[in-house]
Amino acid sequence: MLSANGVTQSAPMSVLWHPALRADWLVLQRTGTIAYVRMLGAPVALLASCVIIACGDFDGGYGWCLAASALLALGGSHAIAHQRVLDALERWRLGWCGALPIARVTTAWTLSMVIIATLLVSLAVVEALLLGVSMHAPHREDLPYALTGVGLALMVGTIVATLRALRGGARLHHADGIREPLFALRWLNDARLPHLPDWQRRAALVRWRRGGSFVMVGIVLAAVPMGAPMLEVASVVLLVLSWSWLAVAMRASAEATAGAVRLLGAMPLDIARARTVSFRYPVVVTFCALAWMAVGVALLRRGMLVPAWIVVAGAASLWPVLRILRATRSAKTAT
Amino acid sequence: MTALLRTTALRVAYGDACVLDRIDLEIARGEFVALIGPNGAGKTTLLQAIAGTAVVCDGHVRIDGHDLAKTPREAKQAIGLAVEPPSLPALLTGRECLALFAGARGLAPIPPATLALGEILSLTPMLDRRIASYSLGMRQKLGITLGLIGEPPLLLLDEPFNGLDPRSALAFKTHLASLVARGDTSVLLATHSLDVAERHATRVVLLMDGRIRRSWDAGELATMREHPGHSLERAMAEA
C-alpha cells in the first residue's frame, strides 16, 4: 500500500481467519491421541456430569436436579471457555504469529467462530446424551426442561466467558501469579532447586484465575437447594472447591516441572533431587485439599463421600503425576 | 594435553533430515572458537548436542574427559549454555531464576561473580522484576548470565549479542576476552557476526550442510586482521 508521501506501508492482513488456527490444528493432529484426550476430556466430563445430574433422582427433588445440572453447565462451560480463549490469545499474541499484521477483529472473529462451533457440537452431544439416558430416567417427561436448562446454561456460560476473555485478554494474568503466599512455607524450597515450588504455585494461581475462580464459587453456592442448612452449604463448597483447586494445582505443577526440566537441560541437574522437589508442592496441595475435604465431610456427616472424593481427586491427579515422573525421567536420558 | 571438548563422528538427525554429519571437533582450554556458517548449517544443533539438549544419533561427546552419554552430570559440570530468551520462565523474577540455576549447579547462594556480571551488563535494576516484563535485550542479558553461572570451563554461546545494546555488547566481549585470557575458560560461539569472529576468536570453524568445511587458525586470523583484503567474509564466500 502506498501512502501520500509515496512510502510503502504494510496494511493489516485482510484474512478472515487467524493463520494460527490452522497451525494449532496441525499441531493437534501431529501430537496424537493424547492431545485429543487433553482437549476433549474436560468438556466431555462436564457434559456427561450435567446429563447424569439432570436425569438423576437425588435428595433435593427433581427441581434441584434440573437447577444443579444447569448451574454446573453454566460454571463449567464458563471456566473451560475462559481459560481456553485466554490461552489462545496469549499463544497468538506472544507466539510466532505475534508480529504479523493481523487485525484484532480477525482474532476475535476466529475465536468466536471456534467457540460457536464448539458450542453447537456440545449442544448436540448434550441432546443426544439426554435423549439416550432419559429413556430409563425416573423423570423422562421433564426432558424438555432439562434440555432447555442445560442448553441455555452452556450458551450463556460460554458466551460470557468468551466476551470477558476477549475484553480483558490484553491484560494477561501473568502479573497475578507473582503474588507472595499468605503463609510462606520456606521448607518447600530446596537449596539445590530453589523457587521451583514458587513457579508451580504461581502457575497454579494463573491457571485458577483463568478458569474464572470466583465464578465457580458463585456457581457452587447457587447449586445448593433452597433452605439448606448453612453447614451443608459450607460442606458442599469445601468439597467442590478443594477438588477443583487440587486438579488445577496438579496440572499447573506438572507444566511448571516440565518447563523447569527443559530450561535446566544443559545443567548438571541432580535428577533424583529434582523429582523429589517437583513433588513437594503437589504433596502440600494434596494435604490441604484433603484437610478441607475432611472438614466438609465432617460437617455433612457422610463418611461415604470420602472414597468418592478420593477417586475423583485421584483421577484428576493421575495424569499430572505421570507427567512429572516422565519429565524427570526424560531429563535423565536427554543425552 | 587433554582436550576440554572432543566430539567424535557426531551425528544428529531430525526425522529423515541429517542436521549434523560426522562432526569431529576439539577445543583446548583457553581457546575461543567461533562457529560460523549459513542459516540451517547446524550451528545451534551442534551447541545443543554438546550441551546434551539434542538427541545424538551417533558419535560421542567428551567434555573435560567425561562422556556426555555415560556421565552426563559430570560432563555438564564443565559447560555453560546461554539460555535462549524465549525459554526463560515468565513467572519468576531474574534473581529467582539465577538462584534456580545456581542451585542446579550446586552453588548457593548466587555466586558474587554472577552478580558482578549482572552489574556489568546493567541487569541489576531488573533482577527483582518478573521476567514477563523484560525486553528482548534484558532477556538476552539474563540468558547470558545464567549460562555463565559458576564460570564453567566451556561456554556455549548462540548469537549472544542479538538484542544487546552496544555498551552491553562491548562489556560482554571484554568479559569473555578476560575469561579466555586467564587460560582456564574456552568459548564456543555460534555467530553470524564475522567481525566478532575475526577480531576475538583464536580459531574459526565453518559449518555448512551439517559438516565442517574448513577452519582458520590463529595465524590465518592474524593475517586477515593485518590485511583488510583478506577478510573472513571473503574467505567464507570462497569456501
Image (tube, coloured by chain):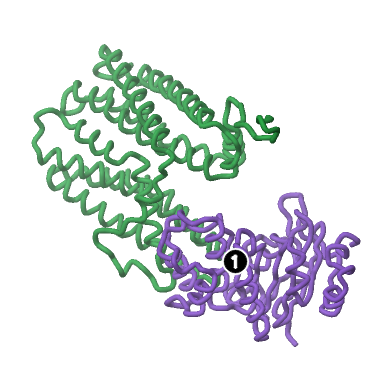
Residue sitting at the far front? A5
Residue in front for this viewpoint, A269 or A306: A269
Q: Is residue B66 left or right of residue B58?
A: left
Q: Residue at x 75, y 69 (%)?
A: B197
Where A218 falls versus B81 (above or below)? above
Residue in front for this viewpoint, A250 or B120: B120
Answer few, some or many: residues within 10 Å of disc 1's Cα (few below 14, many 20 plus, some between 14 and 19): many
Quadrant position of residue A311: top left
Q: Quadrant of the N terminus of chain B?
A: bottom right
Residue in front for this viewpoint, B186 or A44: B186
Evaluate whether residue A335 shows in this view: no
Q: Colour of chain B?
A: purple
Report the residue marked by disc 1: B82
Where A187 falls versus A311 (above or below)? below
Q: Residue at x 39, y 52 (%)?
A: A203
Evaluate whether residue B170 shows in this view: yes
Where A197 falls versus B17 (above or below)? below
Q: Residue at x 35, y 25 (%)?
A: A154
What's the chain of the residue with tag 1? B
Residue in front for this viewpoint, B91 or A196: B91
Residue A165 picture location, percent across and down: 40, 35
Residue B3 picture location, percent across and down: 73, 81
Residue A187 picture location, percent across and down: 31, 70
Q: Is residue A102 left or right of residue B226?
A: left
Residue A278 picture location, percent across and down: 41, 62
Q: Is residue A163 left or right of residue B44?
A: left
Q: Secondary structure at mark 1?
A: loop
- Chain letter for the part of the structure drawn in green: A
- The disc labelled 1 sits on which kind of residue? Ala
Q: Quadrant of the C terminus of chain B?
A: bottom right
